[in-house]
Every structure is written in structure tokens, then in C-alpha cells.
Amino acid sequence: MTVSPERSGRRGNASPGTPPALDLQRISKAFDSKPALIDACFCLEWGEVHAIVGENGAGKSTLMNVAAGVYAADSGEQTIDGEGKSPRSPMEATAAGIGMVHQHFRLVERFTVAENVLLSMDRKSPIRSLAQASLAVSAKARDVGLPVDPDKLVANLSTAERQRVEIVRVLLLGARILVLDEPTAVLTDEESKTLLSFVQRLARQGHAVVLITHKFREVAGFCDRITIMRHGRTVLAGASVTDLEEGTVAKLMVGEALAVSERPASTAGALTLSVKNLAAKSDRHGQGLEALCFDLHAGEVLGVAGVGGNGQEELVACLAGLVRVDDGTIELDGCNIVAASPRKRRQAGLRVIPADRFATGLIRELSIADNLSLTRIVDGASGGRLLLDRKRMRQAAEAAIEDFDIRGASPDRTTALLSGGNAQKVLLARELDGGMKVLVAHSPSRGLDMKATQFVRNAIRRAVEADAACLLISEDLQEILSLSHRVAVMNRGTIVGCRPSGAVTPEWIGALLAGHD
């Protein structure tokens, strides 16, 4: 089913006869001879919030990267405000009025907000000094209602604050067309509502906004029209959101029935991981750990629920050996590994899926084959330490690409070119190997579409049914309940309660998060 923009009708505040803010027609793009876009189309009107949805790898971000000058289309036509323009760089797109806020922010952490903004300005900009940049940031932030402190170091900002900086920056650069790529993937529900309400206000003031997302509740609550993509093609273009139901959108996105994950069969075996009285000082960003205890058995999923920022990231870092533990023990198969290096922990069978796959899991600039081999070089599986066996690495990557259904991939393809879901599959292919005894999975389906989410959850279920133990840490209660045999609640750096999943109620969780017994 494909509906052309002309047939779908127009929404927003554009006057009759006003040319579209952005019009992309018959756009095709391939990477390494693998099609990423096939005759894709998209039409954005002034004054509207227009959602682009689709599973990971459907081509949503690629299409908008073409519009924003990150990629050059192989064929097709593009107009901006009625004029035929195909930006050849992000700078040209910015000059044409398009500003894109990418899923992975492009800020220099050691610089202040004002310094980052000044770094973005071209020679023609009236903003030429740090003082001018600071004043401009404050004025624009006040004007659009997004609190931003121009003098703060980016390294000290929360995720939501960094996102606001990116938005203020592109608006200062003159963007009237704002493209947001999965903007709520790493935000809390409250932060998401605040951002999406701002997006609506911005559109009603005459801007045009593209929201790349896979969350239907965001589309239904905040968007005017929707375009759906699948396998690089536009399968529904510019339909009114009010005319669609969630089931219809899901079917158009996926095109097939989802393989629903089920809780692994309850076969809890021997005690595999035991954490006793774990304590670690807080860093400048988060919550420390205090007297944290839990046990985890083979063939079991222990889900850790709780509001983000209560020590979850610190717990993962302590288990992985990335930060120093001040007190307590971490026993894997009866051996205390609290002083062991990350390499030794991996050799003992510990595997980690971090919350941010690119920050601490994968190296964006390396190929898929290289990323899959990162943990295998020291044991000789990818050749010697001084001379890599590239043939063996490519063969292993080809097998992983097939086994984990990594779409649009080849061993030599740069990992940065993969969608979030396919990048997560690369990480799973590397971590879920034969030597795994304990899997620590932190928000493993964050930012993924429905199909990729089910793939990840099914992979965890199969690993646990093969007698691995899994510590699942997530703010998504549905994810916790769908996989876990027991559920623990984390608050202020410690485990404050634990129950079998069948006994978990929202009231119980709420009371523990509020600090009550």
C-alpha cells in the first residue's frame, strides 16, 4: 500500500498555494552496492509536525540525511521551500534552512555550550566572539522556551540538556526546518513530553518539524501527519494521523507477524553471580552504590527496574570492571572478581550489553568485521596480536551477519552506517558467544523498533534457556516483565526490594521508588 503525498491531503498552518517546506521524490541511495533507499518520497508542509516511522534499517534516517546534506542521493529530486536544492554538505543544508539533530549528539564535551555554538558558525555569521555566542544562546533559549546555560561544560550536561543545546544551536544557525532523529530514545517520559510539546509549539509558530520515531504514542499525541517506510521504500506517504490505528501502522512498518518473545522456561540452576554489599562512590554525573546485594542463578533472568539515574549505570560499570569498587564482593562461579580486569572477567564468562551501544560497546569508525573481532584478538581467534587474519575475520563476520539477520550489512561496511537495530545485532553477535555464563544487559532494546526489540528479547531468552544467567536492567517495565523470573527495584544506589515476577504490581514498585517499604 502506497499513498502519494498529493492524495494524502495537507496539514499544518501553510496557506493554500504555499510550496512545501521540503519535498523529496524518487530518492535512491546505496551503500556498498546494497540499496538503502529505493524511490523513496517524503513531503513536509510548513506549520506541521510530520512523523517518519519504520523499523530499524527502513531508511528513515538515511532519507533525512540525504535531505540534510550528510549523504548525496544516487538519484531523485529535492526541493526546499519550492526551490530545487540538493545540499552537498550539512553546511549547505544549514544555509538552506534545514537543521538536523542526530540521535548521537555532535558536541565537543570539553567545550562549553557557547564554545560549541561558536564553533558551528561560519565566516558570515554576526556571532564572532564567545561573548556574542553566550548572549545569542541565552536569547534564543529564552525565546523558544528551552532552558540552556551557555557557560556550562557539555561534559557536565544531562542527555536532555545536550539535546536542548543541539536544538538551540541549529535554530541559531537559521533552521526553519527541524529534523529530530529518535529524539526521545534516551529521555524519560517527562523529558519526552516536554520536548514534544516544544516541537508542537515550534511548528505552530511557522516552522516545519520532522520527527523520526518508532513510538506510535508520540505520533498519535504530537504529530499531524505520518509517513511509513519499509526496506528503503515509502509504503505510506503523508497520511493524517487521525485516520490511522496503531495496528495498521505496525503492520505497514513490519509487513509480517512479529515473533513474540516469551519469558524463558523457569529452570533456575546453580548460583552463578553473587553481589554482596557493593559500594562505589558517585561520580559527577550520577548516583553511587551503597550496600547493594543480589544473587543470580543459571537459567534465570533477574530484572532490575527503576527510574534512571539511581545507580544503574554505576552498577553496570562495576560489574564490567570499568570503575573502582570501594567495598563489597562480586563472585562469579564462587570466585571473587572484584579486583579482576575487564579481560579477566570476560574470560570468566561475563558479557555486557551497555545502554549506549556506541559509547562503550562498538567503535563507529571500524568495520563490522573489526568490531566483531575486538574481543577475540587476545585469544588468537582473529590471528596474532601483531598480524590479524583478515580472511578469518571476514568469514566470522559473514556468519554473524547471516545468523543475526544484520540487514544491509557486509563485513567491510563501517558500523556507523548501520541503523540502531542492526548495530545492536552486531553487539549481540559478539557478546552472545559460547563462553558466556552471565549476561548483563542494560536497556537492550532502547531506541529500537518493534521488530528489532523482539529480536533482542528472543536472543536473550534463547541464551537463558541454554543455561546462561541474565541481569536485565531497564526503565521499560514491560521489557522487565516480559523476560524476568524475578524483579528487583533499584532506588538511590541499592536494591530496595525483590519479588517473583508474578507478584509484581505497579503499587509495589511505586512504593519502593517513593522510598517506602
Image (cartoon, grey):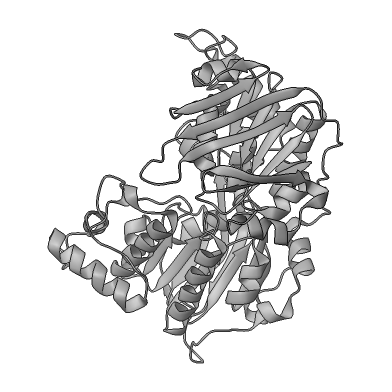
Of residue 73 and residue 420, the one placed in the foreground of this image is 420
Q: Is residue 120 left or right of residue 363?
A: left
**Image coords of residue 509 (percent x, y):** 68, 56
Please tell me which residue is depicted at 54% across the width and 52% down the height of the picture.
308
Q: How many marks?
A: 0
Q: Is residue 155 left or right of residue 27?
A: left
Of residue 286 and residue 320, the one placed in the foreground of this image is 286
Please tell me which residue is depicted at 61% across the width and 29% down the height of the picture.
275
Please tell me which residue is depicted at 70% across the width and 73% down the height of the picture.
3
- Measured along the vertical axis of the image, is residue 354 above or below residue 195? above
Of residue 87 and residue 421, the one placed in the foreground of this image is 421
**Image coords of residue 423 (percent x, y):** 58, 40
Quadrant housing residue 202: bottom left
Of residue 187 and residue 60, the one placed in the foreground of this image is 187
**Image coords of residue 405 (percent x, y):** 71, 38
Q: Is residue 55 left or right of residue 61?
A: right
Outermost front residue: 517
- Measured along the vertical axis of the image, is residue 107 above or below residue 214? above
Quadrant housing residue 470: top right
- Measured along the vertical axis of the image, is residue 279 above or below residue 515? above
**Image coords of residue 306 (percent x, y):** 60, 51
Asked if residue 386 can be seen in this view, the reply is yes
Q: Quadrant of the N terminus?
A: bottom right
Asked if residue 1 can be seen in this view, the reply is no
Q: Is residue 158 left or right of residue 254?
A: left
